[in-house]
Image (cartoon, rainbow, N blue to C red):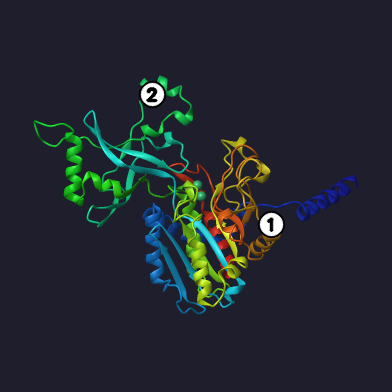
Amino acid sequence: MANETEKTEKNEVKALQEKLFSQNKHAGQRMTEQELADCNVFCEDYKSFMNLAKTEREANAFVIAELEKFGYQPFTPGMELRAGDRIYLNNRGKSVILATIGTEDIRKGVRLCAAHIDSPRLDLKQHPVYEDAEMGYFKTHYYGGIKKYQWTAIPLSLHGVIIRKDGSKLTVRIGEDASEPVFYITDLLPHLADDQMRRTLAQGIKGEELNIVIGSMPFRSDEGSNLVKLQILNILHQKYAITEDDFISAELEAVPAFPARDVGFDRSMIGAYGHDDRVCAYPAFRASLDVPAPKHTSVVILTDKEETGSDGNTGLKSAYLKYFLCDLAECFGANGRTVMSASKCLSADVNAGFDATFPDVLERKNCAYLNHGVCVTKFTGARGKSGTSDASAEFVGEIRNLLDSQNVIWQTGELGKVDVGGGGTVAAYIANLNIDTIDIGVPVLSMHSPYELVAKTDVWAAYRAFRVFLES
Ligand code: MN
Ligand code: MN
């Protein structure tokens, strides 16, 4: 009898806990076989994209080529638009806005997804080429927040553009194909690294030590100095018709030459350079393609310069998004400010996933876990939420209900323990246009490293979240 009572009490407790406690199950326990299969197909496409689009320029070019296949037209102010029309705006080859006109009056606002397509990397300086001890090098200046020591002793590829003296443009992409050479930054052998090993991790490799090896053979001659540099410039001149001064008007980016690969015996994760934030940009772009007839006009913006603070005319602190929305509004005889004030935005950027090897920096009750879905983040910022847009409870409620009603797997989490650090996204700059904005994105491990890690189910959850939002 006592046992019976105990059993009933246990069941009651269990039932009450299930009803009252927050539940957050692993996606692997929640997704159907069909969903897992769809997720895998999507992630194969994502990996192909990652191998083709390693920089903002390459992501921009990839996306625009696809958009043209799907009937998107270049946007011009004043053009005649009706429901179902698809347009895009190419901002200087480094950021792109795509939109599908909805059936609803534009004055009811747009559904906006914003992600960034720039990632931390090493940019070449404007006088990069030099020779020292019969080795040729490039000088670099790193872009975005990196742990510098991680960028040595790995294969690097070179991407970007060079504008020659005559104004012609050369597009550069060397080191991705197995037949091409790669580039390399040296580190000190441990045998001679006693002094270096006593440096702090931040100083382990210093900014001016990130020098890229680019050659070692001299120009054949018994006379003259700097013959290795001469040989390299000679090769570049013959191959690309450039001279040393052409680097002044170039944007060349060294990035890890690794391809995206499955990680783990169960192939449940993807390792790649630049998940931050192409792991949100690609799903947002695909969601736009897959919503041909939205109710509200759908807008996806893939921006540049997030990793250096969003300044500059291709970053989201610039007016290009605002100008686009104003021009779009005018196509329908509406005010830009009316449209913006009624709009809603998912600021799609990655978040830190919980890393069991480094558990101390995250607060376990309020952080994102791999395979627990796309992460909704109410606020970002640092030291008392400084720099955050902090979505309203009302807007969080709206997004929560939308995701739940469409069975999107999602979780909530913030970037790190209070006062441990922090970071921001583009959310604040969009919210500053009087647009309801919330952060949402894929949890990442080893963020900003040369090879970042994400879970496939979370990539899929992000795609589903953006899609149901653009459909709403
Ligand atoms: Mn990011
Ligand atoms: Mn970042």
Front in this rendered view, residue 73 or 22: 73
Give the amino acid type for the residue marked by disc 2 in the picture.
Pro
**Label 1 element class:** loop
Categorize mark 1 by other alpha carbons within 10 Å: few (<14), some (14-19), many (20+): some
Q: Which of 346 and 408 is in front in this view?
A: 346
Residue 190 - label: 2
> What amino acid is at disc 1?
Ser
Residue at left 45%, top 71%?
Answer: 87
Q: How far apart are marks 1 and 2 (CA)?
A: 52 Å
Query: Mark 1 sits on what residue?
Result: 392
Could you tell which of marks 1 and 2 lies nearer the N-terminus?
2
Q: Residue 216 carries which label?
A: none
Rendering quarter of residue 126: top left
Where residue 63 sits in the image (x, y, percent)? 41, 63
Q: What element carries label 2?
A: helix
Residue 265 in view in this figure: no
Task: List x then y, in percent, for residue 463.
Answer: 53, 61
